[in-house]
Amino acid sequence: MNIANFLTLMRLLLVPVFAIFFVQGKYLEAIAVFVFCGITDIVDGYIARKFNMITNFGKLMDPIADKVLQITALVLLTVVLKLNIIFVMVFGIKELAMFLGSAYLYKKKVVVFSNWYGKAATVVLFAAVFANILAEWQPQYYQIDYAAHFLIWVALGATLTAFVAYIYEFVVLVKRKD
């Protein structure tokens, strides 16, 4: 277990802590845990690459920890804050399709990497979740609420764009491998 893997594991273990704070209406604490998880996601990847600590555990668990946090946050925003369920559905369908596509390509000995569309979609989704929790914590600031609603729609668009880009890459890889 190296430091990068430890940070990934810690991030995964903090997801229930984030959820508990959120459900209890402790939005400042939920934001703190969410931001900490986002920072550790950046730091663990940097450490793994910089100090040659890339492991199979990290390759598997890092994206799982990310998706578990993202899905948990979207479900909580939907259930607690009444965010439109379309966001959870689109994100869930994209992630399921990506998992199935990756598994299919893995069987064909093709390694799949994230692209900048996916990374950008993740950053926008992170900002949207952050803004929506912040808007709930500080409801008197209507500007935050408007920005939060706008960002969630931008995140949906970014997620769909990334999904289309991944589908295109999938088709190219399948044709190249056949």
Image (cartoon, rainbow, N blue to C red):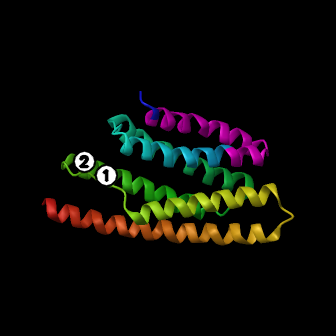
x and y percent of residue 102 in the render? 31, 52
Q: Which portion, as a residue range, is magenta?
A: 4-32
Give the Cα separation between the discs numbered 2 and 1: 6 Å
Q: Residue at x 74, y 57 (%)?
A: 134
- The C terminus lies in which quarter of the figure? bottom left
Q: State the residue lying farthest toward the right.
A: 140
The three-letter amino acid code for the residue at tag 2 is Tyr
* Residue 33 at x, y percent in the picture: 66, 43
For the residues bearing labels 2 and 1, Cβ distance under 8 angstroms: yes
Q: Magenta stretch: residue 18 in it?
A: yes
The residue at which mark 2 appears reads as 106
Q: Nearer the viewer, residue 116 or 95?
A: 116
- Circle 1 sits on which residue? 102
Q: Is residue 118 above or below residue 9?
A: below
- Please indicate whether residue 127 sits to the left or right of residue 60 in the image: right
The type of residue carrying mark 1 is Ser
User: Magenta segment: does it hold 138?
Assistant: no
What percent of the width, then of the height, locates residue 22?
72, 45
Secondary structure beneath disc 1? helix
Disc 2 is placed on an element classified as helix
**Residue that protrudes farthest toward the top in the picture:** 1
- The rendered magenta stretch, by its main secondary structure, is classed as helix
At 44% across and 55% down in the image, what residue appears?
Answer: 95
